[in-house]
């Protein structure tokens, strides 16, 4: 064979071998790169699952919100292999994004004021202190724009983002970030962000998808934590209201007092857990008895507190006078400075002296009713009077007067709050005075307890078993 041909064939063979080796190396490098990318994705998913597990554990433990915020930010930083992170949440006013956790190395995501930038030259921690305290409106700057758009973003270079304003920080140079809105259903919650130096971290398309998923999971966790807290607070409030209701029940008479020549019955039914009505029997020093029924404007805790104050002051004041008006005047002067302008107390205070005589004063309350056994008719006891807490004293004492009256044997006096006559059925019809008079006339021959029970039962039938919107309180007094 020609020696030159042999050389050419040898060179061709060598070239083929070299090309095959190069192709194999490229293939191996590609496989290695794909394996590394796959490993990176698997590792990212592992970090993600670990983070979600920790987040679930935190919710089940009902960790404090501050612990939850830290866990979310530090977990997001770990999953996304980022140097810094921040969490901003919408405040109670639904107007501002408040920093709930800002890591030490998270670069500014809001505009830095000139004074803070100047201060930072001598005090590097000034910027971080500002970032941890500074809120932004939900339409302001980069955070506000992401919050409004509800889109997750990758920002390649924060320094170049015009939404951060003109006072940019050197910390933002060469920094990349991913920012996402936190929302659960229609409820917008806030913003989650991670940051990293561009020369150390470049967020890929896969990173972007993982971050989007992470944002969704964090929003779900926050919504659950908020629901847990709301439920816990509701449970605590209900427990406190129950305790307050129990105490309020203790303050009401547990049984009727022994009254020579009279029998008496009373009942209070709160519209809610706490009542703004109350009634009381007050033993007087001369052997007489004070009977009071009262209705505080409004409902709930504030009204319940006023009833307790009213009861305490009245019990003390009643021992110094047998005049109902004088006692109520003292009560009014004591309570007036402590009652809000939009609150007042209507009440009737009746004094039964040892000789059996009856005197009452009416402070803006519904007029007492008397069923006369002799005629079978119901009449109103009319007397002027101003509600407690409206005037500091002079007008109240001028218009509120004692009314002395008599009951004959079998006659029945009824004191009641407007939760009875103003009760509304499902059609908006009022129970009314006419129906009240009819039931009083029907039940009075059977005694004061029958009057109280009969009226409560009739109001319940009128409401169709629904709970009334106002407290109901009744006191019936009958002469033997």
Image (cartoon, rainbow, N blue to C red):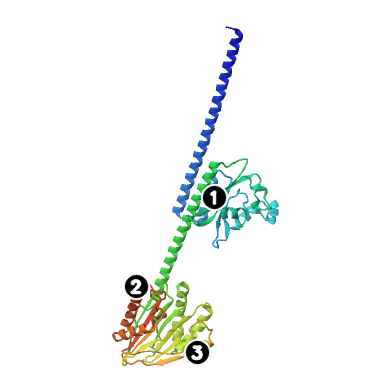
The x, y position of residue 368, in whole percent, is 40, 86
Q: Is residue 92 left or right of residue 422?
A: right
The x, y position of residue 263, in whole percent, is 32, 86
Residue beneath label 3, please?
399
Secondary structure state at the residue bearing disc 1: helix
Q: Which residue is depicted at the point 50% across and 36% down?
A: 38
- Residue 100 in view (yes/no): no
Secondary structure state at the residue bearing disc 3: helix
Which disc number belongs to residue 73?
1
Q: Is 464 or 403 nearer to us in this picture? A: 464
Which mark is nearer the camera, 2 or 1?
Answer: 2
Using a 10 Å C-alpha cutoff, classify the residue at mark 3 as few (fewer than 14 neighbours), some (14 to 19) or many (20 or more): few
Residues marked 2 and 3 touching at CB (< 8 Å): no
Q: Which residue is depicted at the point 44% across and 66% down?
A: 237
- Gap in angstroms between the C-alphas marked 2 and 3: 40 Å
Check the image and report above or below for 402 versus 175.
below
Give whichever of discs 3 and 1 has the lower sequence position: 1
Residues marked 3 and 1 touching at CB (< 8 Å): no
- Gap in angstroms between the C-alphas marked 3 and 1: 67 Å
């Amino acid at each position: 064979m020609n020696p030159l041909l042999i050389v050419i064939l040898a060179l061709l063979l060598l070239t083929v071998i070299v090309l095959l080796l190069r192709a194999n190396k490229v293939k191996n490098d590609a496989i290695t790169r794909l394996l590394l990318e796959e490993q990176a994705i698997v590792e990212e998913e592992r970090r993600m699952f670990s983070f979600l597990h920790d987040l679930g554990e935190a919710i089940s433990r009902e960790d404090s919100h501050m612990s939850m915020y830290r866990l979310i930010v530090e977990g997001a930083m770990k999953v996304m292999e980022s140097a810094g992170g921040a969490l901003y949440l919408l405040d109670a006013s639904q107007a501002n994004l408040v920093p709930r956790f800002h890591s030490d190395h998270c670069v500014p995501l809001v505009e830095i004021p000139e004074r803070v930038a100047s201060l930072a030259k001598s005090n590097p921690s000034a910027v971080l202190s500002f970032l941890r305290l500074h809120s932004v409106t939900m339409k302001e700057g980069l955070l506000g724009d992401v919050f409004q758009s509800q889109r997750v973003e990758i920002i390649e270079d924060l320094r170049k983002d015009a939404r951060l304003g003109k006072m940019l920080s050197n910390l933002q140079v060469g920094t990349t970030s991913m920012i996402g809105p936190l929302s659960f259903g229609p409820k917008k919650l806030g913003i989650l962000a991670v940051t990293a130096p561009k020369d150390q971290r470049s967020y890929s398309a896969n990173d972007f998808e993982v971050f989007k998923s992470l944002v969704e999971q964090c929003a779900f966790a926050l919504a659950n934590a908020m629901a847990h807290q709301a439920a816990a607070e509701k449970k605590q409030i209900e427990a406190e209201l129950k305790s307050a209701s129990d105490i309020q029940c203790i303050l009401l008479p547990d049984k009727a007092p022994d009254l020579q020549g009279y029998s008496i019955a009373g009942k209070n039914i709160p519209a809610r857990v706490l009542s703004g009505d109350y009634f009381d029997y007050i033993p007087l020093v001369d052997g007489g008895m004070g009977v009071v029924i009262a209705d505080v404007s409004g409902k709930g805790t504030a009204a319940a507190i006023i009833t307790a104050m009213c009861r305490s002051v009245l019990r003390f004041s009643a021992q110094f006078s047998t005049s109902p008006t004088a006692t109520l005047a003292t009560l009014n002067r004591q309570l007036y400075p402590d009652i809000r302008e939009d609150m007042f107390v209507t009440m009737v205070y009746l004094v039964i002296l040892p000789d059996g005589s009856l005197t009452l004063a009416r402070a803006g309350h519904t007029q007492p009713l008397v069923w006369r056994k002799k005629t079978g008719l119901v009449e109103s006891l009319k007397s002027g009077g101003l509600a407690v807490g409206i005037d500091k004293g002079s007008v109240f004492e001028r218009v509120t007067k004692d009314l002395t009256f008599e009951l004959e044997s079998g006659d029945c006096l009824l004191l009641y709050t407007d939760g009875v006559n103003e009760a509304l059925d499902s059609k908006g019809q009022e129970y009314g005075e006419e129906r009240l008079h009819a039931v009083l006339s029907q039940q009075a021959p059977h005694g004061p307890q029958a009057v109280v029970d009969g009226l409560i039962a009739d109001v319940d039938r009128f409401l169709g078993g629904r709970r009334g919107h106002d407290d109901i309180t009744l006191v019936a007094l009958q002469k033997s």
